[in-house]
Amino acid sequence: MFTKSTWIRLPRNVVVGHGVLDQTVEAVEELHLHGRPLIVTSPTPRKIAGEAIIEQFAERGLDAETVVVDTASFEAVERVIEAAEEIDAGFLLGVGGGKAIDIAKMAADHIGRGFVSVPTAASHDGIVSGRGSVPEGDTRHSVAADPPLAVIADTELLAEAPWELTTAGCADIISNYTAVMDWRLANRLKNVEYSEYAAALSEMTAEILVDNADLVKPGLEESAWVVTKALVSSGVAMSIAGSSRPASGAEHLFSHQLDRIAPDPALHGHQVGVGSIMTAYLHEGDRGIWTDIRDALRSIDAPTTARELGIDADTVIEALTTCHTIRDRYTILGDGMNERAAREVATKTGVI
């Protein structure tokens, strides 16, 4: 008897393109969200996007409240929850990069309110996904939360974001290659539940960026369009899978460990990009796709070496040999690499 079932939560409105920030309130109204809006943002995004959204709501007779967050933390999430409860917010908008969006997403999930994502940088697929990432001490927690009901991604704003944030978003998407490789491996060896549909969608997004990496250029709005669509697809793949598996494998464990042990970690997307080069090599060896990943990263000016990350070789080796302990997720790293093997793969791929 067939008993399988699933519940897929996806954004209902995804608005992407030139000048679509002006359509934020319209997208919210189509969702039939009611009550006072609470905007969660950080200082720069507030100036370039938040104030314009506040004016849009004011024109509809709604007084939007704003919470400005400087750092991502569980304390910030609690502060947003308190603010939402104090004004009896009908829904929340995360306006900014990953920090504001993740905090708003987690707070909205906690109090059962609708959440709308308004990214000002195409830096990672958290703008669409059902997960939030918050650091605490020397570790980073990935927390499940409902995905946004709507995404409003203005490519004019995204094209003007710092270039390194866009390249980090590209690298995050390109790393889907190795995330899916790990997922298939876990399915074969550990019977981990696997979705062919979600895996295919995730791989397709990585292929789009690898095949079009030479077209991704600073300040080019068409580039922001390509990257944003890929980030949206990656987030949708995770919603279909019901987990972060389509976009998070050993390369993400490597990045999370660098966040713990490196004196000055690089951007998350850049770290997973470098991790993906090494884990692709572990999967397929000399003839594998790791060189395509490396070349695509180079084409968009994303780091491909420890030096370009600003992290010393010994720290990279330490992260590679210990990151398997971060969470119970089977990957190509299995129960861990020894130092000699880690140094060999990092050397052969040119990471160190």
Image: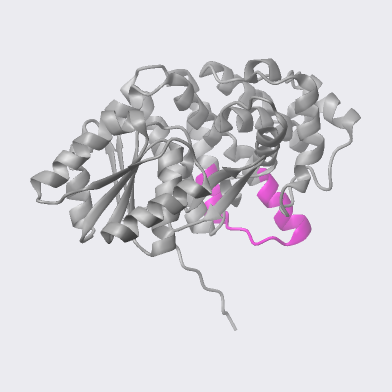
Q: Residue furthest bottom?
A: 1
Predominant SS along the magenta part: helix
Left or right of 86? Residue 53 is: left
- The vertical placement of 197 against 271, above or below, is below
Q: Quadrant of the C terminus?
A: top right
Q: Quadrant of the N terminus?
A: bottom right
Instruction: Tell me which corner region of the image, top left, top right, bottom left or bottom right, holds residue 309.
Output: top right
- The vertical placement of 82 against 272, above or below, is below
Left or right of 41? Residue 244 is: right
Q: Is residue 10 visible?
A: no
Residue pictured at 47% horizontal, 57% vertical: 145
Where's residue 36, x and y in %? Answer: 22, 56
Q: The magenta stretch spans which residues?
A: 181-202
In the image, residue 191 lies in the stretch drawn in magenta? yes
Q: Is residue 315 visible?
A: yes
Where's residue 77, x and y in %? Answer: 45, 50
- The vertical placement of 43 against 139, above or below, is above
Where's residue 3, x and y in %? Answer: 56, 79
Instruction: Tell me which corner region of the image, top left, top right, bottom left or bottom right, holds residue 227.
Output: top left
In the image, residue 138 lies in the stretch drawn in magenta? no
Residue pictured at 70% horizontal, 41% vertical: 250
Residue pictured at 71% horizontal, 52% vertical: 329
Where's residue 321, x and y in %? Answer: 82, 36
